[in-house]
Each structure stands twice: as C-alpha cells, then as structure tokens.
Amino acid sequence: MKPRIGSWDLLYRRECLIPTWRGLLLLLLSGILLLGIGAATVHPFLAVTNPVQAEILVVEGWLPDYALEKAKIEFERQHYRKLYVTGGPLEIGGYLSQYKTYAEIGVATLLRMGLAKDVIEAIPAPAVLRDRTHASAKALKSLLIQQAASNSNINLVSIGLHARRSQLLFQQAFGEFSRVGVIAIENQEYDPTHWWVSSEGVRTVINESIAYLYALIIFPFV
C-alpha cells in the first residue's frame, strides 16, 4: 500500500533511483562515445557518392567553379549523352548580369571550360520560397517528359553534405521508374575529415542534417 499524503488523496510517496557517481561517469562516457561516433559518421553519410548506370548527368548550377570543373571531368570520362544544369533565379546580382538563373550561369561556365554546346542544356527552375532543389528536379522531369526520356536514370552532381538531400529530393520528384545516383564533390571550404574544428564545417553539418531530416520525414506530407 502506497502511503498517501493529504486528506484528498492527491499525492503519494514513492521511491526513486538516482545514479551514483559511477553511474553518472558511465552515462557521461557513453554520451561522449555516441558523440564521437556521430561526428565520425554523419559527414560521410550526408556527403554520399553512389552513381548508377546512366546516360544523363545533372549538375546543380549554383555549385562553385571547382565543382563544375569536376562535373565536366565526370561527363567526359564516363561518356554521358547529355548534361543538364539546374537552378532557380539568382538571389543577388540579377539586375547586373545577363544570366538570370543559376542554371544559365552553370551552362555558361561549363561552356567556357570547353564543353560542347550541343551536349549541355540549362533547366531554369521557377522562383519558390522553399524546397528549391525539389523545384529544380520537377523542372528537369518536365523537360524529360517532353523529350520522352522521363524514365531515364540520371546521375546528379552536388557538393559535400548537400548530396544526400539532393539525391532524395530528385528521387522523390522522378519517382520509382527512374534511378537517381549522386556524386558528391568535396567541399573545399573546410576539411571534411575534421569538420568539427571549423565554424563553417559545424554550421554546414548542423544545417544539412536538419534539412535532410526535414526532406525525409516532413516534406513528403507538405
């Protein structure tokens, strides 16, 4: 029988177990171990490279020049049939530039790098307030439907930790009849093997982790 406190039977006493100093030390060490495992695995998980057999290469036009150069090398080495560059409106400088979207800037950059004009095409995406990667994927899917190639497999070139989220959103847009592979170009703004020692690395890991969970869990229902 549990002892009651007060005349109205609103409270009763109960025993509670609390950890000893040894238990607290074990919890602390376990937490440190889990943090270490997370720090070692989160970056390679998000910065995934997993290409598929495909004739189409897709690159996100907002990528820095060194990443676009790697995309050019990938296109030529693997003998893809076509390279599509995606991207929405410029966020700054649009009134000063002849190019109005990241897709157009990406194409112009790749042409200047030496790619032939007949193998590359810009796929501008509409202006949206959120989920810009998914909007780019839908714009590409619409074009491929017009070209009777909507069920084609594609390989997507992205950068660093953005890669897995981009692959997920493109796969959601393309559906089960197309396979979307991904190639992550290493982010040169920090050392991926020691991302936790730089503010840019920590900020990127936190932001992309949250964004990936949103794309995986919440986005399909909004």
Image (tube, helix red, strand yellow):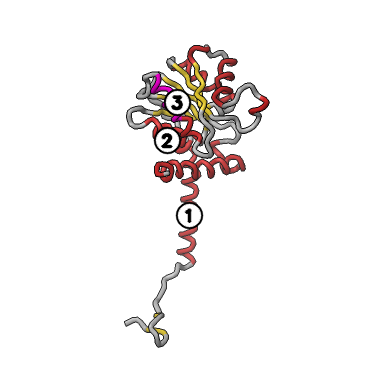
Identify the residue position indicated by label 3 in the image: 140
Q: Which residues are magenta?
A: 137-146
Say what amino acid the circle numbered 2 marks: Leu
Residue located 47% across and 51% down the image: 33
Residue located 45% across and 30% down the image: 137
**Callout 2: SS:** helix
Say what amino acid the circle numbered 3 marks: Leu
Q: Nearer the viewer, mark 2 or mark 1?
A: 2
Identify the residue position indicated by label 2 in the image: 168
Q: Nearer the viewer, residue 65 or 24?
A: 65
Nearest to N terminus: mark 3 or mark 2: 3
Identify the residue position indicated by label 1 in the image: 31
Residue located 48% across and 14% down the image: 119
Q: Position of residue 75 (x, y in %)?
A: 47, 18
Q: Is residue 208 above or below residue 73?
A: below
Q: Residues within 10 Å of mark 1 (few under 14, many from 20)?
A: few
Q: Nearer the viewer, mark 1 or mark 3?
A: 3
Q: Is residue 101 above or below residue 4?
A: above
**How far is the residue under mark 1 from the one under mark 3?**
44 Å
